[in-house]
Amino acid sequence: MNSRDTNRSLRKTSALDQGRESFQKQAWSAVFSHLSAADKETPLEPEDLVLLTQAALLTGREADGIDLLTRVHQSFLNRGDVHNAARYAFWLGFTLLQTGESAKASGWLSRASRLLEAQPDCVEKGYLLLPTGYGAFNAGDAETAHGAMAEAAALGKRFADKDLVVLGLQGQGRALIRQGEISSGLTLLDEAMVAVMAGDVSPLSSGAVYCSVLDACGEILDLQRAQEWTSALEKWCASQPDLVPYRGHCLVRRAELLQLRGAWSDALEWAERAIEWLSRPAAKAVRGEALYQIGEVHRLRGKFTEADEAYQLTSQCCLVPGPGLAQLRLAQGQVEAAKVAIHELLGVVQTPGPRARVLDAFVEIVLADNDVAAARQAAEELAGIAARQEILFFRGLSNRSLGAVLLAEDDARAALVELSQSRAIWFQLEAPYEAARVQILIALAFRRLGEEENARLELTAARQRFKTLGAAADVSRVDLLLVKDTTNSGVPLTTRELQVLKLVASGITNRAIGDRLNISEKTVARHLSNIFTKLDLTSRSAATAYAYDHSLI
């Protein structure tokens, strides 16, 4: 061997050693750099190519990862190692499925299956059951999904492949949850997570399980479990600074929790950070979830234009959104548009967790249209979901919706029982916005019973929560409710006119009033003209005096 060949061999050996050492340290960028350098000197053996492939995928280099998986497959095939050739044909097909290249994925999965046709049972056949399970799950066939995942986990256990066991367990857990067996499903997911946190599973499989478990928590609105596993995922990502694929998912789930807990500024920041991480095509659906969270925060803050834009972008990510857009239309006073949107969602969303939130919004919207019968039917369906699934969040939604229906049916005493239970749940879950929404209904029930002092206490507490959160539109709504009923006070104004009169009395301009109420300046002027005519007033100062004289401020 001449000196040139010797130097090349030394460089490769050094790069290989550094790459392997970096792999043990989970320094993925260093792994990719060192092993790529070694590969340029002399093509790597398939075992080291596997390490380079994982580093490429974990640092977000999907195109490189797919090319490397192709090389890994061919290298094992050239060596006559059919099992490993089939294994990496599977991983290539599975990766292509996640990037949306279904035709190529089908080809590679078929190749893996063909390679194993003449082989006895082996762990690779277990891996090939995973796409079947995921496909059935996504198609709504939870029973078939469960069977495929259980068989995969059994093969993993039989051949001592911890990755396959854990992937099979999480698949079974997700399928059981879809079948309504929440407790059993969560037990399997927790078991899978214990193996992941113990470090028994490869990084690629670990990340997939983390994200799947968090999706399950979001699906059934299990806030406590979501909090625990989100924190675990954050620590796992933080321990690997170069990690790319799972950070966006983690950030979206954190944004959801923060929004429910009332930390809206933080939720917005985390959702925006998630979008930065989720710029890859394969992350399109999760990016839609981040955009939806941004829309939710803007809607709750009363920034309706920004919320609308975010919801529209959500739909472009091929994601079936939550009820936020319908609730936005209701907040804008567009009841008919809200009904159309929520009816459309109700026909599409069948998974229990998301459907519970749609039903909750449906009740609010149809009650605004005085359709008590439709609200009663939806509230009863929601109660059925809550009874079957033993999740506090569902019970909170159900109690609130049923209380609102009872109130509309003029049974304020029964409504108070349901609403008080709902309020207690939201306090327990540390969800201040949801608690304040219930307090408004409790106040209306007290008012129906003639207990004005209790009603005012609830409204004042709700107003303070809304103000602390920055829920401007809700603060204005409570302000209207804190004013005595217009019929009893002798003030011949509509609700909107009364709202405009109060804002005029506060000393702000027509433009500012329009911004506050999300209406045009021209519409404000028309309301003001009607107020002057009805009350026989001639100026803004006279209107202000009238408001104070009649205890409207």
Image: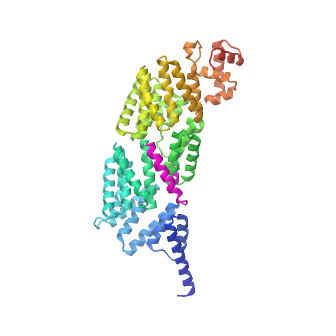
Report if residue 337 is visible in the image: no
Q: Which residues are magenta?
A: 222-249
Q: Quadrant of the C terminus?
A: top right
Give me the residue at 61% from left, 28% from top. 517
Give me the residue at 56% from left, 39% from top. 297
Give me the residue at 67% from left, 29% from top. 512
In this rendering, is residue 512 above or below 448? below
Identify which residue, 46 or 526, lies in the foreground.
46
Q: Give how far across and how far down residue 509 sits, in percent.
A: 70, 26
Q: How many marks?
A: 0
In this rendering, is residue 56 above or below 525? below
535 within the magenta span: no
Identify which residue, 339 or 202, lies in the foreground.
202
Q: Give how far across and how far down residue 342 sits, in percent.
A: 46, 33
- Colouring rule applied to residues: rainbow
Q: What is the magenta segment's predominant secondary structure?
A: helix
- Horizontally, residue 537 falls left or right of residue 386, namely right
Name of the residue lying farthest toward the bottom: 2
- Horizontally, residue 535 falls left or right of residue 146, namely right
Report if residue 385 is visible in the image: yes
Image quadrant assignment for residue 546:
top right
Q: Give how far across and how far down residue 344 sits, in percent.
A: 44, 35
245 within the magenta span: yes
Identify which residue, 76 or 147, lies in the foreground.
147
Q: Give how far across and how far down residue 1 sits, in percent.
A: 52, 87
- Horizontally, residue 532 falls left or right of residue 90, namely right
In this rendering, is residue 299 above or below 445? below
Give me the residue at 55% from left, 88% from top. 2
